[in-house]
Image: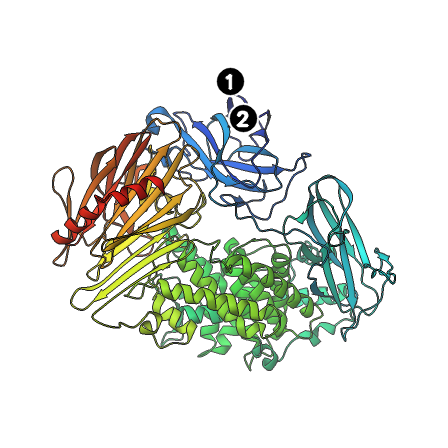
Amino acid sequence: MLLPVQARYAGGAGQGEHEGEHAITANNRWSRALLTFRDLPAGAWCCLEARLAWSAEEEGGLAADFVLAGFDFLAGDGSSLDVEQVPGLSRTLLDPHSAWIAGPACQPAGSELLRMAPVRVAFGVPPQARGLVLTLRSWRNTEGVTIAEPCLRPVTPLTPAPFRSRRLGPNPAPSRHSLVPGLGLVVRGQLHASRVKEHAARVSLVYRDRDGAEIPPPYPGTVSVPGSEEAPGLGASVNLPAQPQARRFTLDLEPPPGAHTLDLAFCTWEEEGEAGPAVALLGPPEVALKDGFRLESLCGDDLLDAPGFLARLSARLGRDPGAEAAWIPGPGEAGAAALPLARARQLRGEGERPVALRPDGGLVLRLAGCPDWALPDRPDFDEDPFRAAPVRAVPWRLAYQSLTWLLALAEPAPGRALGLAQAWSRANPWGQPADPLSLHPGALLPRAEVWIGLLALPGAGAAAPVLTGEAVRHGFALAEIVGQNTFGRSLHQLQAAAALLAVARALPRLPLAGHWEALARESLRDGVPALLPEDGRFAESSLHRRLDLATLGHALRDALGPAAPGPLVAARTEAALAELAGLLDPAGRLPPFGEVFSGADEASWIARLRGTGGLVAQRPAAAGPATASTMLLPDTLTARHEAAGRGWSHFACTFAETSPQGHADCGSYVYAAGSTRWIVEAGGSEQVEAGASRHYLLSARAHNVAVVEGREPVAGYGLHRGSLALPGATAHAIETTVHGPGYRHLRVFVLPHDLSGLAVIDRVTALDHGSLTIRAFAHLAPETLVAVEGARRVQARQAGRRLGLVPFAIAGRVAGLEAAIARGDRPGTMQGFVVGQPGTLAPACTLSYAVAGRGTACGGLLMAVDGPAEDSLARILARDELTRFLMQA
């Protein structure tokens, strides 16, 4: 256990009344306690543990972002590490990485009486980290709070933490950047060396002319190391010192005359085989033009319209007045540019027309699944017709501000579409948006493509200066997002690169077009392998989001072509689609883990992506009266069975990595038998649900998982630990880290070959050998009738079919069985709901069963479709080899 070695305070915070307490006043973001920890276990997982206490007068109890915990990791010499991504934490602006601590109403049952609750945040420790400054900030609290006894406890690692290596060597692959004539590049990043060194690494530069021929050095601001007969020279380089160990650098690169492209490579001074410190980049380098060509600098304090922005850019580039007119593309040029985001929406099957013409000439918008809304004749573009229902208002506003509905309107009424596009531009001078949500990536990124789509209309002539100005202005915003890696490893970052590629392709005569295309390609080359990894360990746990990623990759194929990274994107996309197709259940649905897109037809969606004929093409054809198959991926296990007369059965389990802001579903499962869905997930999506509903849907109470001693699981992951063949069944063992450093957890699924039932078994060992209680949940489908028959049996019925459920203990004792339906007294105890219609929670029965023991508790839930299946499973559970497997796995 690691305790803080130093405590500092600011903004009104201070030491609490007792030793080890830190008092934080209600002063948003300013009141904070800064705690320093040393000797972190580099490359492993740790868990922050503390106790949060609040006053009886606290009014911010419903806030999911009640207090902010910020993490600033330190190298051995105390320098701050700007790590690209940390498992279990989110990137934020105030602190390099953060996790939210929820308010009192979101804490577990009983905490409202004590006015205190435990805090646990698990995270991966970067390999370069030796220390940590933990900042506990006031956020939504209205009264003072205290954080008591904070400490860090190492979590036993199952595998090395998933940090992406960017270690430098002597022979790196260079990245190519296109230059804007007459302008240099600014490259920023951070270097880390295992020891302080003046010459830790270097940047190798090769400028090339328009024909691709190398321009010989010297180059401004570089040194050149000449070669000899024995050894080649190093060419033009810039030294990168590591003083301190984690050193931020900024390179102002001035190209020589005639330079068209730049090959940039980060490498070590040492040759192959020479000893030297381990040196690595902590993230992808940021690439930008000079500050005078940042969007903020170009716009200044002026409320420029779109043509005015083009004129300002032309003057900044030193062009003659009116030269910007040459940048306006013709309809053929704009139409030749592929629009990846629009193509991805089409592949998803968003077929409902978002806009309709009324007989009187008025327009009706049908956006984000909301009711029809009549567009005013002269919209102000700050409209919010569903403000009374936030779960509808935000998705609707994003769809409205994206302007993608203008592309649909352009088919029957191109003049109306062009007029509305110009009206939006007038209402939204850069820096003063009519609706702040118009700057959200969910609106900004697709809107960038809309200007290109409208420029392709044959009648766009008079509107072309406005459309081009907006396309260029949006291009600058996208270039800054892409060049600075603003959204990190995320779908939004890839979407920004895709939209930037479209803008660059549509404006071939714009001097920045080549630079933007190179930025987009480099971002995709770096980002796609992280989000669609070759080993199948996705950074995104939601299968639906993985499908969205694969859809974007498929849509990018035409835009990228055979040039890099086109082949890489195509290969990773096809591999991901093959896996996702194999995970479809016999009814054509993906297992609903993590974020779920309500109403999506995944089988048809995947069929469109793979160019196949439909659902049948996505799964193996039945070879006889009964077929069975099992599929094991690095973070998902599925099994299926189909038999004539019995219908289909299906099982799926996820053990993907989770985070504090994600679903606590590591180890969760779904089950169907007799073509009937029995065990389901609560579902939900951040695009729809909010507030208390969203907090519940992320919690363990909304998933078919186990909790230990009533504590919410922490960020972590699972590993498949092996399988055991049994008579008529197979047992699969999955070990997880989500219960923190004090416990070892193993979840075992016993699956009969015909999936006529299953047994889910949890074994938890307390490392302190104390008493413990496991409580696990099973969510039954909303249409299920449930009868509790005594203390240890539940009967579930649907449409004439039945499922018996029986809790049992192998080590310890069964400590209770409960059924909860629509319990909604406070967010921290909500239970018995699943998502019905988008944005609404439907009552459903949630079974909660408990097993208690000392040192080790082991037990679970048996479920079967009939008496013979239940008897068969009971005999399997009694076998000695299964008991040994449970206790030794």
Total numbered circles: 2
- Percent of width and height locating residue 515: 69, 66
Which residue corresponds to mark 1?
19
Q: Can residue 438 be seen in this view?
A: no
- Percent of width and height locating residue 822: 24, 44
Q: How crowded is mark 1: few (under 14 residues within 10 Å), some or many (20 or more)?
A: few
Q: In this view, does 707 lie above or below 205?
A: above
Give the amino acid type for the residue marked by disc 1 in the picture: Glu
Q: Residue at x 15, y 67 (%)?
A: 645
Q: Quadrant of the C terminus?
A: top left
Label 1: element kind: loop
Q: Residue at x 52, y 45 (%)?
A: 160
Label 2: element kind: loop
Q: Which of marks 1 and 2 is nearer the N terminus?
A: 2
Q: Is residue 449 above or below residue 721?
A: below
Q: Nearer the viewer, mark 1 or mark 2?
A: 2
- Percent of width and height locating residue 740: 42, 36
Q: How is the image coloured?
A: rainbow
Which residue corresponds to mark 2?
3
Give the amino acid type for the residue marked by disc 2 in the picture: Leu
Q: Residues within 10 Å of mark 2 (few under 14, many from 20)?
A: some
C-alpha span from label 1 to label 2: 13 Å
Q: Is residue 371 visible?
A: yes
Q: Residue at x 79, y 50 (%)?
A: 239
* Image-quadrant location for residue 672: bottom left
